[in-house]
Structures are given as structure tokens and as C-alpha cells.
Image: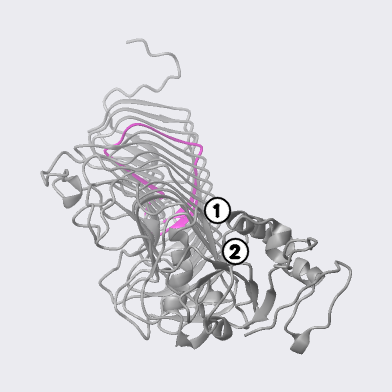
Amino acid sequence: MGKPFHDHDPNHQEPLANDRRMSRRKLIASLGTVGLASMAVSAAVYGQSVSSSVYGPPDEPGLPNPRPHAVSTTIAALRAESRPLHSDLYYITDAKREGFFLFDPNDLTSADNTGTIIATASGARLKRVVEGNIVSAAWFGAAGDGIHDDTAAIQAALNEGVNRPYTIVTIPSGMYKLTQELFLVKNTSVVMEPKTELLRSHGNNVFRNYRTSDVFNGYEGNGNITIEGGILNGNALQFPHIASGMAFAHAEGVTLRNVTIKDVPSGHAVELTAMKNVMFDRCSFLGFAHDGSKYYSEAIQIETATQAGFVGYSKDHTTTRDITVQHCYFGNSATPGMVPWPCGIGAHGSSYNGFYDRIIVTGNTFDYSSYWAIRPFKWTNSVISGNVMNNVSGGIFVTMPAPGSESTKDANGAVQPTQPASSIMIADNVIHTASNTGIYIEGQASENIHKMLISGNIIHKTGGHAVNVKACRNAIISDNIIDTSSKNGFIVADCSSTVFSGNIVRDVTFYGFNVSGACKMLTIEHNKITNAGQTGNNVYGGIMLTGNGSDLRILHNVVRTDTGKARPRYGLNIHATNEKVVRYGNDLRCDAVSGALNDLSPSPVTSSEDLLS
């Protein structure tokens, strides 16, 4: 056991016997302001002042001096102590576990966890003086050498959150081998250094905020959780069983900041089920082990707590909402055999009346997504802005449940009418090379997607259509730049009350605008189309309207063909099956082979004067 000291003179420092005793000044310096505050709390519990707790009471004439001892010691020596006194203060010197401990005479039952509670041979309990509710995984024996199993040590640190109002768990730099899933409790922050790496060495997730036996409803589960810094390594090559990096359910208030999640086996980086108020800030999602079965798998999956989508109890159809993903990167890791996630963020299932509301995706970069970079499935009141998508299969796919599908069932399992995505702004994104479509809005004939704003996007080089808008109403598609598409610039079908305005389309293989189906109150105005129909001369053209549309306005568009480029068939071609066409002010001097204009619609209005009947 360490040796005590008695310091009578505040200005006098006794020599340390075997370097084990500590002066008053050294003790104060070691404790610091927060430490002294913690001592004050401890002292109050035991009926002492801070001075008395650390140094003992002042000498009183005629009375023995009962002042306490401050002892430098080790955990092993402290555990061997047979008669600790409640007035004793101990300083642990074990590497990475340094700190002060006080005897708690009122506790004879708490388990020894190495980090904050030490049980002596006599059954006494000594408690660590914890500053600001900050605990270190190293206190509990986490080695961080990539060899020893650090699961129990880190979980012990996380368990401190059970009895504290809020806990900050720090994990120093190192590689921490995990052989079981880590469980997060509410009101917890996990703070890792940039070179802290949690190495998954088992078949489950790295983190989860619920156990499958938990029964939480709504958002009442373990929330108010922050994870900051560090690397979560899914170690998919060594442990290929499908899993996710993190799984959160039935809670609110989760933040991930500067976290890297990599090499996950066929699952999600983060799975959000029935979650609210979640923030991803400056995170990286790198490397996915693709077995081919999860071609749609999202790095960040948002879902509803349903029988089909949630592993655990409380399948109460609570949806996920209020999610922000900002300044994150989605791509590949440097690990051989890994690929980027097929989808960066999205959903692929829901339920009746289950909408994903207020999803904000801004300022992110997506590289080489093999499905869609972003897939808003039944999103509402959401924003997708300022993102860059490079060499992806598809850029942004806004969709909704197919009629009669699993995602139209209510809580009783009965199929209900399908419900659409709505009120989504897609603005100021850059899609640079997509092997499929750049932006795709897919509504249903029975219920259209509605209230869409698609504006200010730059779409360069698509293998499919640049923009595909199907079964959409009350939408504005404006001020987008399309450059080089292997199919159409815009393909539009069965849309109503929708405006296409101020777009620039250049070098497309098929049409600048290809409009079909039963479109109503559709406006195409002030667009500039250059080099449409580049598959060959006299095949495709600038603007084409087929189908059986009604109340169509084609105004002030410009169609041109550069010298040496394939010549379009028509600048503007309107089939006879369309009616109530208003057409004027278009500049169709595009060197078309069959004619600048071919309008077969009945009685088109070609004047800019007011229409009164």
C-alpha cells in the first residue's frame, strides 16, 4: 500500500518517501479546479469541507490530529487494502488509469469495474473522483493494441451512463478489438481521437442503442447520444456476416460528427428506425462488401418500425424524421475487395401514413454509387442541395410505394391506397457522369408526386435521361444545365400543373424535351436547346409532344444546332393527339432536316394576346 503524508505547513513540502507521498501544492495542481469542485461534492457527502477532505482539519489545541492521508498507490495495492478510512484520498498511478479515489463508507455492494469503482479485500468500495462526468475507456482496461479484447472495458465505460445525468466516454488513439456489439444508453457522448479505430471482430453491429428485447414506442428509447471522431471498421473480409456499423431505433437526438465508418459487410453504415432529430456532420462512409443481394443497400438507411423493416420489438409503425446529412463523403475505402455503398442515403420501405419528413441532405459528395446516390422514398418537406455526385449509376431518385405493395399496408396489415412523396426541393446539385439517369421523379398514375422544385442543378454526361419526370403535379423545374446525355435531356410523362423554365440543354442523343402521356397544364418556356438528336440526322429533335396532352404552353424556347453536328428532324414537333396548345415566340432556327416546326394539334393558339374564352 502507498504511504500517507501529513502536511502541517502550507508552504512546506516534505520529501516524498519512495516518491509515493504528495505535497499540498502538487495535489492541488493534480486535482485542478474541476477536481477540487468534485472533491467539494464528495466532502459534502461525508460532512467535510474541501480542505478537510484533502488535507484534514486544522490542528486544535488539546485534540489529536485526525487529518486524512493522501496516498499514492496502485489499483492492485488498493484492492489489497484491508482497512481503508473514509478520510483517505488515494491517487492511482497505473498507466492510463491515473486519478483520485475516495472511500465510500455507504457502499458495500457496487461491483468493481476497475475504472470508477474499486472493491478492496475487506469489501470496502472506493470511488473515482470524476471531473465533468468524463470517463475514459482506458480506466477500465481498454488496451487499444488490436490484440486484446477491449469489448468489456469499453462497455463498462459506456455503462457509466446508467447512473449519471450525462456521460462523456473518451477512447484514446489505438485499435480496439471488439468481440461483441456495444450498447449505448441515453445521454451519452462517445469522443474518439482521429486515430481511434474500433475493429469489429464478430458477426453483429458495432454500436446499437437498443437490445432486441427492449420495448420502446415512439421516440422514447435511448437518445441524446453523440459519437464524435474515430473509425468504425466493419472488418468485412474477416467477418463477412451481414451487419451494420450502427443501429438506432425509437429515440431522438443523435449526432455523428467526424466519424468514419468503413468496410461494412452488406448492411448499412447507420440504420435509423423510428428515429427523430439525427445529425450527420462531416462523416465518411467508406467501403462496402457487396455480395450482390443488396444492390440497393444504403449507407444511411431511414426506415419505419414495421414487421418487415425492424429487428426487435415495438413494431409500432413509428417513422423516421428530422434527419440532416451535411458535409459527408460517400465512397470506397482502400481495402481490397471493397466497393462504395450502392446508395448513399435513402429508404426502400415504409407503411401507410408513414412519411419520412424533413430530411435535409446538403453539401455532401457521393463517388461511384452503383444504385442511386440519394433515394428519397416517400419523403416530404425535404431538401437536397449543394451535393456533388461523381461517376454514379443514378443521381437522385424520388419515388413512392407501388400500389398494393408492402409499403402501403397499415398497422393491421391491410393494404391502403398508396401515398406520394411531396414538397421536396432539389437544388444546386452537381451530377458529373451518371451511367443511368441524373434526376428521376417517379409518381404513380393513381396518386402523383407533387410540390417539387428542381432548380439550379448541373447534370453532365448521363447514360440515361438527364431528368425524368413521371406522374408529377404542381412542380417547377427551372434553371438547370444539362450537358451531354445518351438519351433525352428531359423526358416528361403524365404530369400536370408543371413548369419547365429557363433550362439549358446541350448535346443530347434523343430529344431536348420528350413529352408523352396525359399531361395537363404543362408549360415549357424560355429553355435553350443546342444539338438535340445527336444519334444521327433527321431522327430526333428539339421538343417533341406525343400522347394526349391538354392545355399545353410552349413559349419562347430557342433550338439551335452547331455546325458539324447531327441535324434534328424538327425543332418543335407536336402530334395531333394533343389539344388546347398555346405556342408562340419560339426560335426554331436549328437547321432541321424535315422542318423547323411541325404542329398537328387542332387549332393551336399562336398569339401572345390574352385568352378570354
Distance, label 2 to label 1, CA atoms, is 39 Å
Coordinates of residue 495 in the picture (x, y in percent): 30, 36
Q: Amino acid at mark 2?
A: Val
Rendering quarter of residue 236: bottom left
Dot 2 lies on which element? Answer: loop
Q: Is residue 64 left or right of residue 141?
A: right
Q: Residue at x 28, y 46 (%)?
A: 318
Instruction: From the viewer's side, name the closer residue of 531 and 515.
Output: 515
Where does the C terminus fall, quadrant-wise? top left
Residue density around tag 2, few if under 14, some if 14–19, many if 20 or more, within 10 Å: some
- Magenta region's main secondary structure? strand
Residue 71: image location, x then y, percent: 68, 77
Residue 130: numbered disc:
2
Query: Quadrant of residue 98 in the image?
Result: bottom right
Outermost residue toward the right in this view: 11
Give the percent coordinates (x, y) of residue 349.
Answer: 25, 53
Residue extending farthest to the front is 62
Residue drawn where x is 64% and y is 82% of the image? 73
Badge 1 is on which residue?
A: 363
Under circle 1, the secondary element is loop
